[in-house]
């Protein structure tokens, strides 16, 4: 969601900004723009749609060594060229890109900007107009700080001033932003991936900090103007991790990476005795809690639902799972000794972060399970467990989901062993079996493509049913299908269908049923019969040992608590092929953003 790039150095800024924006495409956006400085002044190029559309309007003859770039995911004002960033102040002196939401923009317009004519519907324009207003009576740096002190909400900002052509003014609050350091240049980027091709040295920024970025200097201040010293860190990112290679889509590459991710997780968490272990502080925090509150969004929330089963069964601690966007505004009664577990692939999701800030204020402990070391949710929680899944670029999350489930299993079993609540559970062995099963499924892709063609070619809707843990995987299968193929899909508890939803079943309605749990094998099959009797086009995916004749696919057997790790793969692949056959943009589905940095 919204990406920012900036460059100041000795090379042509244009191409560096554009390439950086392309690396940020995965975050989701609906318009893009860049602004560069040279001896003729500021040149702005922006366009609605893809970066390729914007590239087409960039004047190739303009060369410049300073510039800022932006991909916008619309919040205030429709996706349009006029609302695309960069935005300029009334006189054209200041040019600015912004990621985030300014909550008090209306009040600021009334109080300070009644005489200013606005050119867009964005909240961003308020920032740049305020800077211009204040800069009439003070230095730019001061005007910038004064403006920032007035803003309520979230922002990552990069700004140019025609009267300081050797500087990019940068600020951050809640929205992610990094400054990259090179030999004779500096860059600005929403994440390290955007600029990893030219530097692996990045300075982390904290909330309410500004940076005065020059070619060979980057000075950090707080909003009171006090100097802050912070050394750059080394970003451990492999450039090939963020390339598609020979794959047509990142999503397919990331689905295929899942067996490898399982093995990497085993390696990362294995101790000298060969057991899977977590930091003893985390184990103690888990064991001391009388209730775990898992808070997450989207796919991570679905992983949390599976995590509840794992923690309750293996560690014997009660767990509640909450959607972050609900929890913040409607907090349940908390137990006496809660521990909060935030699950977030990106570690930047604003809804989850809002809850983290609140529970920290209340004095509770928090653990973040994330794929991104150093991300906001990781920094601000007391403890972190990493997913080791490598960068996930496709908007539809796949390998992060299975990595989250695997790490939750490790968390549950390590806590369980410490508390002596589990009998024999050799998780290393079981996850090894899972990795092999995943490999078999990834090698059987054609089968799932055929299923997509058979069940979903002209479907207007689709149901995923299951019981117990299969129900939670069904929710994830439905989310995958709807987000990339735009087929209306619903995940449903098999037994609940007859209480309303079965009214939607018509001749040929696709119903995909999961049957991986011995305890409910009979009852989910009875539910399939109910929909079959009403004309549904059934597709049963069962597990070896539980199969019956007519099942469309039989999964290799894995431990019954770990079935989500394998049963989700056919659903990911069916969604992928359904979207592909409908001509959808698989990696960048409409209206969606990978990293949702607004609440
Ligand atoms: C967005 C993404 C989803 C993701 C959700 C939570 O909506 O499109 O794929 O599951 O955010 O993201 P997080 O990074 O917190 O896991």
Image (cartoon, grey):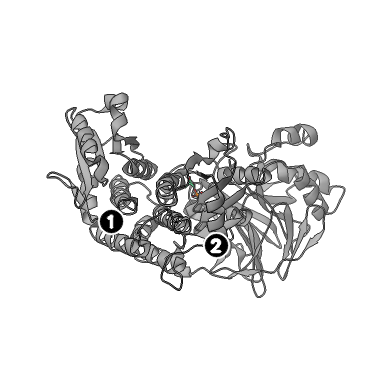
Q: Label 1, secondary structure: give it.
A: loop
On residue 280, the disc is: 2
User: In terms of sequence position, does the residue under pointer 2 or pointer 1 come before the other?
Assistant: 2
> Looking at the image, is 418 positioned above or below residue 151?
below
> Looking at the image, is 432 positioned above or below residue 475?
below
In space, the residues marked 2 and 1 are separated at their CA atoms by: 28 Å
Q: Which residue is at a point 20% across and 34% down the rendered structure image? A: 526
The extreme left residue here reads 549
Does residue 430 appear to the left or right of 395 in the view shown? left
Does residue 22 appear to the left or right of 552 in the view shown? right
Residue 426 horizontal/vertical position (percent) = 35, 62
Residue 409 horizontal/vertical position (percent) = 41, 55
Residue 570 horizontal/vertical position (percent) = 28, 51
Q: Residue 267: which quarter of the image?
A: bottom left
Q: Which residue is at a point 71% across and 41% down the rendered structure image? A: 152
Q: Which residue is at a point 59% across and 44% down the rendered structure image? A: 337
Query: Which dot, 2 or 1, sits closer to the camera?
Result: 2
Q: What residue sits right under mark 1 in the picture?
A: 558
Q: Label 2, secondary structure: give it.
A: helix
Query: Which quarter of the figure is the C terminus placed in?
Result: top right
């Amino acid at each position: 969601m919204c990406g920012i790039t900036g460059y100041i150095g000795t090379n042509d800024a244009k191409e560096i900004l554009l390439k950086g924006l392309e690396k940020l495409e995965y975050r989701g956006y609906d318009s893009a723009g860049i602004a560069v400085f040279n001896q003729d002044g500021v040149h702005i190029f922006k366009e609605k749609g893809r970066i390729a559309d914007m590239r087409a309007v960039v004047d190739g003859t303009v060369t410049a060594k300073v510039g800022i770039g932006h991909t916008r995911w619309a919040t205030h004002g429709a996706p349009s060229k006029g609302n695309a960033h960069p935005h300029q102040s009334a006189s054209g002196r200041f040019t600015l890109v912004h990621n985030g939401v300014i909550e008090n923009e209306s009040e600021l317009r009334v109080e300070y900007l009644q005489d200013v004519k606005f050119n867009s519907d964005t909240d961003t324009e308020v920032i740049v107009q305020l800077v211009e207003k204040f800069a009439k009576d003070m230095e730019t740096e001061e005007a910038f700080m004064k403006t920032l002190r007035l803003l309520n909400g979230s922002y990552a900002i990069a700004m140019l001033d025609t009267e300081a052509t050797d500087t990019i003014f940068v600020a951050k609050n809640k929205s992610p932003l990094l400054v990259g350091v090179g030999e004779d240049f500096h860059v600005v980027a929403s994440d390290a991936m955007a600029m990893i091709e030219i530097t692996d040295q990045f300075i982390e920024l904290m909330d309410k900090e500004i940076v005065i970025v020059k070619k060979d200097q980057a000075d950090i201040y707080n909003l009171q103007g006090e100097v802050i010293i912070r050394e750059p860190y080394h970003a451990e990112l492999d450039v090939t991790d963020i390339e598609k290679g020979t794959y047509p889509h990142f999503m397919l590459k990331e689905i295929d990476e899942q067996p490898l991710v399982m093995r990497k997780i085993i390696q990362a968490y294995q101790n000298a005795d060969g057991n899977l272990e977590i930091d003893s502080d985390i184990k103690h925090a888990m064991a001391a809690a009388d209730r775990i509150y898992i808070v997450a969004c989207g796919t991570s929330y679905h992983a949390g639902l599976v995590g509840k089963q794992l923690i309750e069964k293996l560690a014997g601690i009660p767990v509640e799972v909450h959607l972050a966007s609900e929890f913040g505004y409607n907090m349940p009664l908390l137990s006496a000794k809660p521990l909060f577990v935030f699950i977030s692939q990106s570690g930047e999701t604003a809804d989850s972060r809002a809850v983290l800030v609140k529970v920290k204020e209340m004095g509770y402990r928090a653990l973040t399970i994330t794929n991104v070391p150093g991300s906001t949710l990781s920094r601000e929680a007391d403890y972190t467990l990493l997913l080791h899944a490598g960068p996930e670029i496709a908007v539809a999350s796949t390998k992060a989901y299975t990595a989250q489930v695997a790490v939750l299993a490790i968390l549950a079993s390590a806590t369980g062993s410490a508390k002596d609540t589990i009998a024999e559970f050799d998780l290393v062995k079981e996850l090894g079996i899972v990795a092999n099963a995943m490999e078999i499924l990834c090698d059987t892709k054609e089968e799932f493509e055929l299923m997509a063609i058979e069940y979903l070619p002209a479907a207007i809707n689709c149901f995923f049913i299951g019981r117990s843990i299969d129900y939670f995987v069904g929710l994830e299968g439905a989310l995958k299908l709807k987000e990339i193929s735009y087929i209306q899909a619903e995940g449903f508890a098999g037994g609940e269908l007859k209480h309303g939803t079965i009214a939607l079943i018509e001749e040929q309605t696709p119903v995909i049923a999961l049957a991986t749990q011995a305890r409910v094998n009979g009852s989910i099959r009875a539910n399939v019969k109910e929909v079959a009797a009403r004309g549904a086009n059934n597709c049963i995916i069962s597990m070896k040992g539980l199969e019956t004749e007519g099942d469309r696919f039989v999964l290799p057997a894995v431990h019954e608590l770990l079935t989500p790790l394998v049963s989700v793969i056919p659903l990911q692949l069916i969604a992928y092929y359904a979207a592909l056959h409908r001509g959808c943009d698989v990696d960048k589905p409409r209206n969606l953003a990978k990293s949702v940095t607004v609440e």
